[in-house]
Image: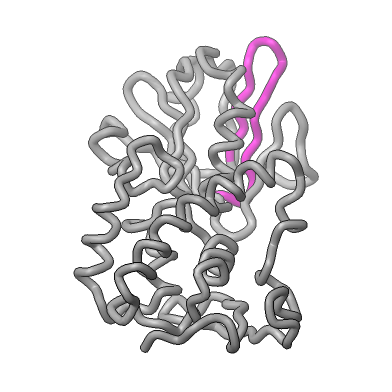
Amino acid sequence: MEGPSLVILKEELRPFRGKSVAEASGSSKLDYERITGQKIKAFRSWGKHFLIEFRTFSLRIHFLMFGSYRINERKDAKPRLTLRFNDETEINFYATAIIEIEEPLDDVYDWSTDVMSDSWDPQKARKKLKRNPETNVSDALLDQNVFSGVGNIIKNEVLFRIHVHPDSVVGKLPPRKLTELITEARNYSFDFYHWKKLYQLKKHWLIYTKRKCPRCSIPVFKEYTGKSKRRSFFCNNCQKLYS
């Protein structure tokens, strides 16, 4: 689940803020007695980490590849975490990795790396990219220490938007292209957010999973690029290789 989806989840869970957990359960290795009775202080997100903050500790939820959630309903599967409340409402998380965080979240997370955050710092991202000039652009966009919240869909669409081949190398990008890479990582994340809220995300994909380039009307290539070996969809004609 990419960063924009977690921002949407935060908004959906807003009515639960300030409520006390009447009962906590699930298959995760957590101290459920500790969670029961705790009042939810805030819901936060950093990149692909969803955070439930209580007064003295927090829960970090990572949705991995196939994680999901249900609000006031259940799937036909055992939840990793269920939070029930006295008004008979509940939140269920499935196929997720969940841990407890003891430290204050502001001590754990650098919010300036989150592309959806008001604290996002593009200059910090640029400095980090310049320190690793041999990095493949595909890996760079998926690096959560640089672009927290960017996932594979955003990676593909950003590279198509800026006409850059996914096998390009960061250090070979002209300064203008590097600026575009950083700018569009954030811009597309907000476009993703707005389209997903309207249930129109797939409708706006230009290159991801496509067979024909919408600019050149020629076949799209699919390869597993970078050290991460994640799927890349690209056009060999209009996406330039900088290597």
Q: Quick one: 174 or 18, which is closer to the camera?
A: 174
Q: Specify whether residue 94 is painted magenta.
A: yes
- x 50%, y 20%: residue: 36
Is 194 on the left or on the right of 121, as rendered?
right
Is 204 on the left or on the right of 240, as rendered?
right
Is 239 on the left or on the right of 146, as rendered?
right
Q: Position of residue 108 (x, y in %)?
A: 27, 40
In this view, 16 is above or below 9 = above
Secondary structure mostly taken by the magenta-highlighted segment of the chain = strand
Q: Position of residue 181 (x, y in %)?
A: 42, 64
Q: Specify whether residue 100 is painted magenta.
A: no
How is colour applied across the structure in the image? one colour
Is 102 on the left or on the right of 99, as rendered?
left
Magenta range: 81-96
Q: Quadrant of residue 91?
A: top right
Q: Quick one: 70 or 239, which is closer to the camera?
A: 239
- x 74%, y 27%: residue: 72
Query: Is residue 151 in sight in this rendering?
Result: yes
Q: Position of residue 89 (x, y in %)?
A: 70, 19
- x 54%, y 56%: residue: 64
Q: Quadrant of residue 90?
A: top right
Q: Position of residue 197 (x, y in %)?
A: 69, 39
- x 39%, y 38%: residue: 100
In this view, 155 is above or below 111 = below
Query: Is residue 29 in sight in this rendering?
Result: no
Q: Quadrant of the C terminus?
A: bottom left
